[in-house]
Image (cartoon, helix red, strand yellow):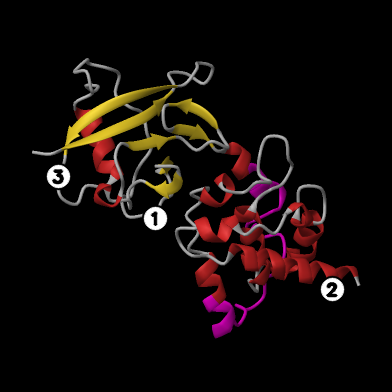
Amino acid sequence: MPKLFIKIKRQDTPEADSYWEDFKISHKPGMSVISVLKSIEQKPLNARGEEVAPVVFSSSCHQEACGLCTMVINGRVQNACSVKVDELSQPISIEPLKKFKVERDLVVQKLSAIKPLKELKAWLAFDGTYDVGEAPIYGEEEASRSDTLSTCIRCMACLEVCPRFNERSAFVGAMAIASVSNLSQHPVGDFLKSARLEKLLDKGGLYDCDNVGNCQKACPKNIPLFDVIVELKKDASRMMG
């Protein structure tokens, strides 16, 4: 049975130095990168036949719906559950996302991406403190747009490829901006639209985007993230007069 040659970038603790470890596993038709990692997990032997600690990684749905298994595979940000090894050149290199602090091996801390969602009030409020009235009418065009934006799986691929999203910048990133756009178009979330947009005019908001467009290209759900940012910039210009 043919072998797959795998190189995994590992890190034992958040403070430890990273290192590469090589593995050889048996090839099976239709294997995904997650299948490879699970095979190593079940039999953690490196390429020299030495028993090592199982590689730590995150996964859940195995159908590109949860965003947990986003990694850098052969230099590209991808969801490991949807990438087939037969489509990759060998050796196959697997690394954790580089924009986030590594917890262990391929697992990273994503709080820096989630925090802006709270700051931008990226949710619909139903706390009972005001009369929401009758259910609002949601047009077909608005529903279609919302359906597209709602396919976001919080995989962070857009942030990984963004040159402005890093530890030296306050930029909130395309994921948070798209969430704000989606909620502000919702009939129930519309009442906070101005407040959200004003927040996006602060440091780290819309105008910290350099218009590169990597986010849109990297999105596994083909969400038009760059187009959303451009649209919100127009809304901001109209609001400011």
Tag of residue 238: 2
Q: Name the residue under label 3.
A: 28
Q: Could you tell me residue 190's position as x and y percent?
A: 71, 70
Marks 2 and 1 sit apart, C-alpha to C-alpha, by 36 Å
Q: Point out the frontmost of discs 3 and 1.
A: 3
Q: Which amino acid type corresponds to the residue marked 1 in the rendered image?
A: Ala
Quarter of the figure with the N terminus:
top left
The answer, for residue 8, to whether it is visible in the render is: yes
Nearer to me, 42 or 127: 42
Q: Do the residues labelled 3 and 1 touch (CB within 8 Å)?
A: no
Q: Which amino acid type corresponds to the residue marked 2 in the rendered image?
A: Arg
* Circle 3 SS class: loop
* Circle 2 SS class: helix
Residue segment shown in magenta? 115-144
Q: Does the magenta stretch include residue 132?
A: yes
* Circle 1 SS class: loop
Residue 50: image quadrant is top left
